[in-house]
Image: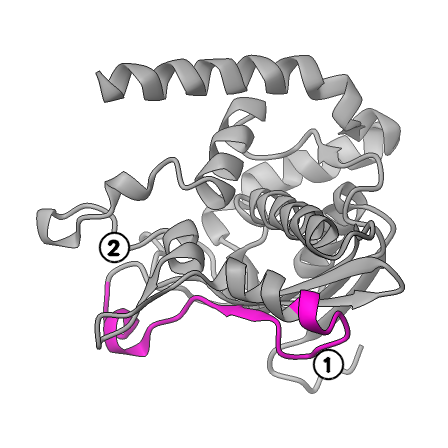
Amino acid sequence: MNEDFDLPLVCVQADNLAEGWERAVLECWERGAAIPTQYDREGDPPSRDVALALAIRDAFAEPRIHRALPGGIHDLEVYRQEVVDGIHDNWIDPEAGKWQYTYHERMEAYSLPDGRVINQVDYVVDALADAPHTRRAQISIWKPWEDAGIDDPACLQRMWFRVFDHRLVMACHMRSNDAFKASYMNMYAFTDLQRIVAERLSERIGCEITPGQYNHMVDSFHIYGSYFAEMEAFLETIEARTFEERTWTMAEMQPMIEDSRKRIRESLERKEK
């Protein structure tokens, strides 16, 4: 790596999601530039920060789940449903001091100043059905007329899709991404949207399209100084355990995932009453 760069560019290629996330976090820790953030508390060391280009060969290759994911399986499933199903879209109410947006709302009900509303997932499926090799199938998240100056502007900026040899490639570009405490959950949920688009496209064109390569591009991939003690424990775990001991397959976690889905469904039903 050329140390003359102000913000190091880290490029990682991995076979699966768990490997890709782990290696990206380690690269950020080892190579990241020291820089303060707007969220630092007094006494926090500066964050470690890189620009990231992560390519995962197969978004659904196993092992898919890393045991060091923030929260746990239940939190992971809640976030996945928030992104792909919009279970928390009803929390959007900025005038009441609640959420200003969700990714799901921006993807499926992107509202324009003139009152039009665009379902961008539908657009992507339509564009790929017309021409699987198109370079125009993308989803935009940012709204400059709304997001400039708000307290919690969207980190995800856009998603891009293209079919290569019956495999759907997806790229997500983020302006900012908490490497240690958020990026794994982001990747897990975003790749589930990749699966959904592949399934919808397969149905539309009558030909099986499977999820393929996933690219995760980040302008600021960072580890906050307040996390450094937890990072040290993470590094010790990597030294002490094999990769297989640090990860789970989807099959291993399926009972817990199904239990979480049941709990989420029951919770949503109670709130509807």
Seen as rendered, the residue at the extreme bottom is: 4
Residue 47 in sight from this viewpoint = no
Q: Mark 2 packing: few (<14 Cα in 10 Å), some, or many (20+)?
A: some
Q: Residue 149 location, x and y as percent?
A: 23, 72
Q: Is residue 149 magenta?
A: yes
Image location of residue 28, percent across then percent down: 67, 60
* In this rendering, position of residue 248 left or right of residue 8: right
The tag earlier along the polypeptide, 2 or 1, is: 1
User: Between residues 78 and 13, which one lies in front from this camera angle?
Assistant: 78
Residue that appears at 25% across and 55% down: 100
Residue positioned 55% across, 34% down in the render: 70
Q: Position of residue 15 (x, y in %)?
A: 87, 50
**What is the magenta range?**
128-150
Q: Which amino acid, by three-letter code, is at mark 1?
A: Glu
Q: Residue at x 43, y 60 (%)?
A: 119
Based on the picture, tell me whether residue 93 belongs to the magenta stretch. Answer: no
Which of these two is toward me, 191 or 123? 123
Which marked residue is nearer to the observer: mark 2 or mark 1?
A: 2
Q: Reply above or below: 67 against 145.
A: above
Residue that badge 1 annotates: 3
Instruction: Residue at 39%, 13% (x, y): give it.
Output: 266
Secondary structure at numbered mark 2: loop
Query: Which residue matches tag 2?
Result: 100
Q: Which mark is residue 127?
A: none
Nearer to me, 98 or 20: 98
Give amino acid for label 2: Gln
- In the displayed structure, 67 sits above or below 97; it is above
The image quadrant that residue 14 belongs to is bottom right
Colour setup of the view: one colour
- On screen, residue 3 versus residue 144, left or right, reads right
